[in-house]
């Protein structure tokens, strides 16, 4: 209990879900939840990295591990977000965030998310300088060893995914139903001051919320039903996005299983007024959506009709789907089946 | 198709309409749509004006041509905004923006707006310096000639309307039903950082959204039914509004036809902390609203009861109404009758 | 009437209430109303304090007197906020704000709030310097004398409440139903640019809105019904909160009468990146909530189950409840009983 009261390593936050946080069916957008998760992570890690006297810093999001949405959240429910620092390396902080949804009329609570995020402290004076992270105390030695293992794993994965960044989504005119072009969508956003950290760079949570918004439009246009975010694959934030940039967020469907859709989302930043810099790919990710019946049960989705190129992407998506399915069976039963 | 992929002269954006974008009946506010249109215009013209190396700039909205709302948009629908640069003069850019509404449950799409906006590139270093616009390529020579004609026309109209700026709206106590004083309303807004461009001046779209908000309150108080924006007359943005100003947006009814209401809206800016500058009239415009039955059909509205002064304004409004009606019959059939 | 047109001492504002301003039952949050009230007060007092040439300033909220919510406001209604400067001392401005709610479908209006706020003009160049307030003209000498009496009273009360600031709320695991720990809640917020005045300090209205949000969650978790803000005790703003701070807003129930709940709310600011300053208590306040039936009538609430410490706080709360009840019977009948 003493440990829990330690304000630098534990944090609880709650907020009522509003109509604008949700779709027409009343289900809270995955992006709203990802944004709350990232806010909690940014606050707890920035606080920790400034807990020792020395150069001041802001913790920037470097990576979010694969996150499942275990159960939909509804308008009027209270989201409880709790965040804890679970590992620190020399230059990075691992934060684990749990989200609980509480129906305040019945008192019923259920876990909706368990997320893991990695942050890096960047100096307030010089944003390109990574500072050292004060070490945390572990209750058991095993906790530190497990943390180190997770740290090494994500480091490896970040190297692997650094390459997959070339693709561009072109508009298709008069696409056939259920083809990729039929549902692909894009959104533009002018980065304003409220989107940014004290450094003047976009919060990771803001980017993820916009990505989920586009992915949701793609999914809804494909299957024309009530759709919800089921999961997001690990996302790496290689490139920062500065205030004043215009960002284009584009999404296209890459794979359908019987009851799920995989959507790839690209974020391209265009720093057109501020710097002599070219438009660049800032982030990319895969979102998985399911379609729900009126009773909230997953229902079959229309299958994707592909061209040659798209078939290749479909096969890649199928690979990811089977890999995830296998991993999940090894590691644990999903919460909904417990 | 190659031309369409040219990122500096064409732009597509989509967004799901949320509860806060709409009135209680579920119809999206005209102001929400105007704001999306202006954002797209600002991005595409700023991008174009910075496409050649040289001094950096931000494109500021100078004028919006008369815009019709051809069909109401609803919560849950996806708005598709596409913007294209259609003409450039030495110092200004014409952008045409189309808005399509897509019902993602049925796949049905319809055009809701076709708008034309004029932007002027202002230097980032010195906001009072207007830069030169890089010329665009036209597919046919006729396109350039038509553009030039539109350019000359709007230039003339901007000179004419520069005068109409003296009026002030005073509160009336215990007004009679259906008089001007009965429905007139005003709203104050403290200009915050999110309302502003990189220059620190209010986005034209933010101003138009606030103007539509006031006009909608005036219309609803007059006829106490579900009202929607039918059109906005051309608006000229003569005066910039700086961050930190307080703006007062006031609206009063000037004319009623059998099934429509015309509302005049004034925007006054008060730069009270920042400069030794007086309160000034920044923008004014005429909005036309219609009242809809539960089935979405326009219904008759209560007629305006006027004083002497108001009668004069009513006659002016009637003039504008008949002129527009005549113009429309000459130019084209409205979309809803095609 | 001439006096009313004087733009520096009178101000009217109206806005339609949106879904995001309200709870699921459609009742507008007290916090939304408090924020509108404070915005009007800040604008009118800043405008007044800058009305004479000299050093420019921003008026900062110093105190809000006890405010009753006389009648719930609903989505789709228009809130009319009118503000008037009613007294000026050498260094402070008293603003009285009335809020009217108008059902635009029926035209029915009713008073929902009458609030009194005190502002202090702080120099734009040096935020620690309090400037002099230009005196206002009073229609009768009695108005000035009454104002002076109110000024002296609040000055005294501000001294008294300066002490009550030590308590911290700790999380309780597995709390029993209806205990304090069962409903206590907290919320974190990263102070962004849109939350702040030109000085870069949080608007008092933003703080009050967040406080009401937490208090509402506490009340709803305790009684699991449709709850609305009934009143807020006087709030003193002793400590400013700077942009970039993280604020933690925590609430716990301190008292229940038959049909009302009292909730204490603390605001703690953590300026963790910007300064070598410790986390500090910025504001605290007591909110009273009632639970409404479907017909909008107050219904009994579950009684609070207390520990020893909590019993002491309960007795204190009971004291405040009886004192307020007695005061109200002396001063005037509440509007709802007229």
Image (cartoon, coloured by chain):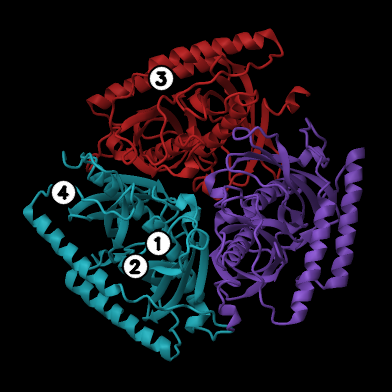
Chain colours: A cyan, B purple, C red
On screen, residue B179 versus residue C11, left or right, reads: right
Q: Chain of mark 3?
A: C
Q: Tell me, yes or no, whether dots 2 and 4 are on the same chain.
A: yes
Residue sitting at 62 percent across and 50 percent down? B127
- Secondary structure under badge 4? loop
Badge nearest the viewer, 1 or 2: 1
Badge nearest the viewer, 1 or 3: 1
Marks 3 and 4, how far apart in space?
47 Å
Q: Toward which corner of the image does residue C28 lie, by quadrant?
A: top right
Q: Foreground: A79 or A295?
A: A79
Place of residue C210 in the rendered image (x, y in percent of width and height, measured from the top left):
44, 39
Place of residue C216 in the rendered image (x, y in percent of width and height, measured from the top left):
43, 39
Place of residue A108 in the rendered image (x, y in percent of width and height, measured from the top left):
33, 51
Q: Tell me, yes or no, whether dots 3 and 2 are on the same chain.
A: no
Q: Chain of mark 4?
A: A
Q: Which residue is mark 4?
A: A135
Badge 3 density bin: few <14, some 14–19, many ≥20, Cα 10 Å: some
């Amino acid at each position: 209990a003493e440990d829990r009261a330690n304000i630098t390593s534990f944090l609880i936050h709650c907020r009522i879900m509003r109509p604008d946080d949700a779709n027409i069916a009343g289900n809270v957008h995955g992006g709203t939840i990802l944004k709350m998760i990232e806010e909690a992570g940014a606050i707890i890690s920035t606080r920790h990295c400034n807990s020792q006297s020395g150069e001041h810093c802001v913790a920037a999001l470097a990576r979010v591990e694969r996150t499942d949405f275990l159960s939909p959240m509804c308008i009027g429910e209270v989201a409880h977000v709790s965040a804890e620092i679970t590992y620190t390396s020399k230059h990075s902080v691992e934060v684990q965030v749990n989200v609980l949804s509480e129906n305040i009329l019945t008192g019923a609570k259920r876990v909706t998310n368990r997320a893991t995020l990695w942050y890096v402290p960047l100096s307030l004076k010089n944003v390109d300088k990574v500072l050292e992270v004060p070490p945390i105390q572990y209750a058991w030695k095993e906790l530190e060893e497990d943390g180190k293992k997770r740290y090494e794993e994500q480091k490896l994965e970040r190297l692997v995914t650094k390459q997959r960044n070339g693709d561009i989504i072109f508009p298709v005119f008069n696409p056939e139903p259920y083809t990729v072009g039929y549902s692909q969508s894009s959104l533009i956003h002018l980065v304003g001051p409220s989107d940014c950290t004290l450094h003047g760079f976009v919060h990771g949570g803001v980017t993820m919320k916009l990505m989920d918004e586009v992915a949701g439009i793609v999914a809804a246009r494909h299957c024309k039903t009530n759709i919800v975010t089921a999961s997001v694959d690990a996302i790496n934030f290689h490139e920062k996005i500065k205030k004043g940039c215009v960002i284009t967020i584009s999404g296209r469907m890459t794979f359908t299983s019987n009851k799920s859709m995989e959507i790839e989302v690209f974020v391209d930043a265009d720093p057109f007024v501020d710097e002599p810099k070219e438009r660049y790919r800032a982030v990319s990710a895969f979102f998985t959506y399911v379609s729900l019946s009126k009773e909230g049960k997953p229902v079959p989705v229309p299958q994707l009709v592909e061209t040659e190129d798209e078939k290749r992407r479909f096969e890649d998506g199928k690979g990811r789907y089977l890999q995830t399915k296998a991993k999940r069976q090894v590691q644990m039963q999903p919460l909904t089946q417990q």
